[in-house]
Image (tube, grey):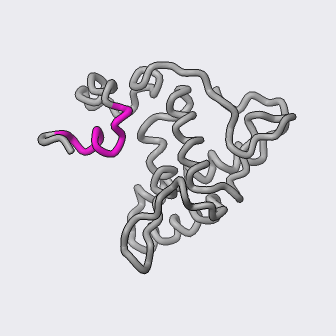
Amino acid sequence: MRVGADAKSLVFPQFSGAQSAMQRKDKHAPAAELLGSAPLGDAPNATAGNPAAVDFTRMTRQEMFDWVNEQIRGGAMSLDESTPFIGMTLKMSVETGQSVDLATDTERVDFIEKARRGIEGALWRRNYDEADRLRGAVATMERLQDAAPGIDLIA
């Protein structure tokens, strides 16, 4: 751990090159500007006929995390837009109270349903900003989930 390091560099050390845009506090800077442009790879659960197809109803947390990183690196998603998706990849053990490692957790999760339950919880807590972010995540997942083969999903 670095003394005096900001939280973003500790949680997302690969984003340390993004400091100039973050120091400007430009929340809506394109991810390509923040991270540099990198080509998108195949999405998790992609099919041969539709390499951009993603099945959000049966992904592991690691697959979701990898998909989000691909979107950010490719400029299709900003860091702000990734927040609800990254939040859905977090998991705590009831027994230990510690986070469960992404790499070793093979449980398949329906992230669309998880986000919908998150919206209900956010509304119950009257956290309307969180509910809006989760609604945006659901809309993105449903759009990509239902996409027809051969359509370029990333603008």
Which residue: 58% across, 65% down? 114
Instruction: Give the x, y percent position of residue 72.
Output: 50, 33
Identify the main secondary structure in magenta.
helix
Classify 123 as above or below 15: below
Classify 128 as above or below 32: below
Which residue: 56% across, 30% down? 76
Q: Which of the image's four quarters has the N terminus?
A: top left
Which residue: 62% across, 45% down? 140
Which residue: 42% across, 60% down? 128
Q: Which residues are magenta?
A: 5-15
Q: Which image quadrant for residue 80?
A: top left
Question: Toward the viewer: 62 or 146?
Answer: 62
Classify 99 as above or below 153: below
Residue lying farthest to the front in this orientation: 104
Left-right relation of 11 to 135: left
For residue 143: magenta?
no
